[in-house]
Image (tube, rainbow, N blue to C red):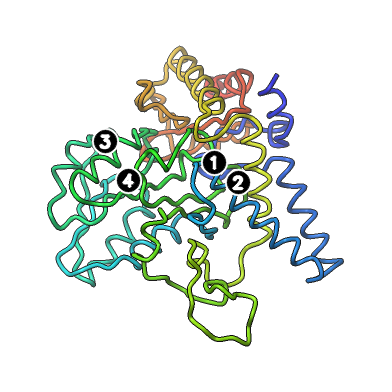
Amino acid sequence: MRWNEFRQSMPVAKKWAYFDHAAVAPLPAPAVEAVTAWARQAAEEGDTVWPQWAARTEEVRRTAAQLINAEPSEIALVPNTTAGVNLVAEGFPWQAGDNVVTLDNEFPTNQYPWMNLARRGVETRRVPAPEGRVDLNRVAEACDARTRIVSLSWVGFASGWRLDVAQAAQTAHDRGALFFLDAIQGMGVFPLNVKTSGVDFLAADGHKWMLGPEGAGVFFCRQEHLDRLQPLGVGWHSVRRSSDYSRIELDLRPEAARYEGGSQNMVGMIGLGASLDLLIHHGAGPDRSSVADRVLEISNYACRRLEEAGATVVSCREPPHASGIVAFQTPGRDLKLERQRLLASGVVISFRGGNLRISPHAYNDEEDIERLIAALAST
């Protein structure tokens, strides 16, 4: 009943068997209603309701913190994952000769900001992850006394490999480094407690598994690291007395909001807040696995049906590493053209890393999977 209720909140399910949440998620009805209400107010009321929007945005900050058991003061509302990565990459007090350790199969967002530090004498060490499998022993071996940050994705965007976050953080800390988590492919589904897992920094745009609009994301900075990062893009919103425009005093806020700079994407954040409320209502949270269990259940069912239909599942489906991302091959097909062919049958998937990729959410059901299987068999 819970998942039927969730499905009723997703207008996309009326038309599509939608398996592309690892790319861009469709908006749930509550987010659509929140964004539409904002647009109506903006058109009819102008800035007379701005204080209401600002208050709602602060509620979103608290909700995002609740989702990962952070303090609201540790959450900055950012445009995207890239912005969050760059807050650390450009704000950290690097010295020439320092290095960052990441993986060679990371999404570009978790590689380019670190590689861009070469101009400051900082090396980026890209550890091989053959077949998408992450060996934390190899990550540890790549670290040395000058490793300052280890930056890894919670879930690999192409392979679907899911890290044990606490183990990854411990690997970094054991080598004297801090741990940055690119959480975009896990946050909103899998439980994460930043207080106990050892994550130092985290970033995630909301437009994938959190079901939010693009351009509205979350950055987490452990309180003890706030003063370690030089704030970038400092503006009126960065200081304690942010609403006193006539008082010019660079007195930074003692919260992660100091990194937000100027005016926020309020409509995006309001939409994201509605989506987060929906996910929490259906069992997402730092110590709640209902959404994760359902995503794994439906993706495991998809794997069984794909294999029965003659496809080869490439993603690791061992319980500690399985995620909602499933990469697979269909023998004898032009995989680059397969997505367009499936779209004509009402099925949405992706082509990533040389494989077809599905990424079902908790509202997807067995009927959606059967539409996928039928579409694959239609030629």
Q: Are the residues flagged by discs 3 and 2 in contact, CB closer than 8 Å?
A: no
Q: Residue 101, position in %: x, y?
A: 23, 51
Dot 4 or dot 2: first in sequence order is 2
Indicate left or right for 252 with 100 as reference.
Answer: right
Amino acid under disc 1? Leu
Residues at marks 3 and 2, CA–CA distance in whole angstroms: 31 Å
Mark 1, Cα crowd under 10 Å, few <14 / some 14-19 / many 20+, is many
Mark 4, Cα crowd under 10 Å, few <14 / some 14-19 / many 20+, is many
Secondary element at image label 2: helix
- Relative to residue 139, is residue 149 depicted above or below? below
Quarter location, residue 19: top right
Q: Are the residues flagged by discs 1 and 2 in contact, CB closer than 8 Å?
A: yes
Amino acid under disc 4? Leu
Task: Name the residue that disc number 2 marks.
Answer: 63
Q: Residue 270, position in %: x, y?
A: 68, 54
Residues at marks 4 and 3, CA–CA distance in whole angstroms: 10 Å
The residue located at (39%, 55%) in the rendering is 109
Residues at marks 1 and 4, CA–CA distance in whole angstroms: 20 Å
Which mark identifies residue 67?
A: 1
Dot 4 or dot 3: first in sequence order is 3
